[in-house]
């Protein structure tokens, strides 16, 4: 998700279409690797389970945070959706090397 978000945040230029296509391929891969989970009200969500702790690979966790969890993945998917619809994505982080 971080690589895809970086590709989408780079200044637009001659490679914009290629960067967006690669970001779409990354998003498709992320969605393929997700688990569909019931939310209890008839709707479903997605989660990504990972083995973060290499000394305990059996400890699998689905995290919700930005850097290592669903929040970061979700933000990337929203950024990609905006790019594919030709809309501006207004969220920029202070450490964005391409901030405007």
Image: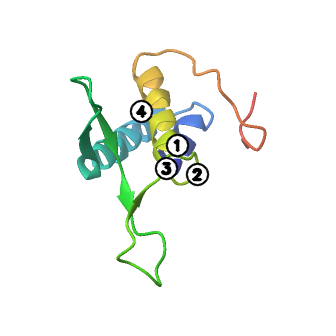
The residue at which mark 4 appears reads as: 17
- Percent x, y of residue 27: 35, 42
Specify which label sits upstream in the sequence, 4 or 2.
Answer: 4
Left or right: 24 in relation to 87: left
User: Label for residue 72?
Assistant: 1
Q: Residues within 10 Å of mark 3 (few under 14, many from 20)?
A: some
Q: Residues within 10 Å of mark 4 (few under 14, many from 20)?
A: few
The residue at which mark 3 appears reads as: 69
Of 15 and 59, the residue lying toward us: 59
Query: Mark 1 or mark 3, which is nearer to you?
Result: 3
Q: Is residue 95 something one can see in this rendering? A: yes
Q: Secondary structure at mark 3?
A: loop
Q: Residues within 10 Å of mark 1 (few under 14, many from 20)?
A: some
Residue in view at x 58 percent, y 30 percent: 12
CA distance separating discs 4 and 2: 26 Å
Residues at discs 1 and 3 in contact (Cβ within 8 Å): yes
Residues at discs 2 and 1 in contact (Cβ within 8 Å): yes
The residue at which mark 2 appears reads as: 67
Vertical side of 89 occupied by 40: above or below:
below
Q: Residues within 10 Å of mark 2 (few under 14, many from 20)?
A: few
CA distance separating discs 1 and 3: 6 Å
Vertical side of 96 occupied by 81: above or below:
above
- Percent x, y of residue 3: 51, 50
Of 19 and 67, the residue lying toward us: 67
Q: Secondary structure at mark 1?
A: helix
CA distance separating discs 3 and 4: 27 Å
Residue in view at x 27 percent, y 52 percent: 33
Q: Secondary structure at mark 4?
A: helix
């Amino acid at each position: 998700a971080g690589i895809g978000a970086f590709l989408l945040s780079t200044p637009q230029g001659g490679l914009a279409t290629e960067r967006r296509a690669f970001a779409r391929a990354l998003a498709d891969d992320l969605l393929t690797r997700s688990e569909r989970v019931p939310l209890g009200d008839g709707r479903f969500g997605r989660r990504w389970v990972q083995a973060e702790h290499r000394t305990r690979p059996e400890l699998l966790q689905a995290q919700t945070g930005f850097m290592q969890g669903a929040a970061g993945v979700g933000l990337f998917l929203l950024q990609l959706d905006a790019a594919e619809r030709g809309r501006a994505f207004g969220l920029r982080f202070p450490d964005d090397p391409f901030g405007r």
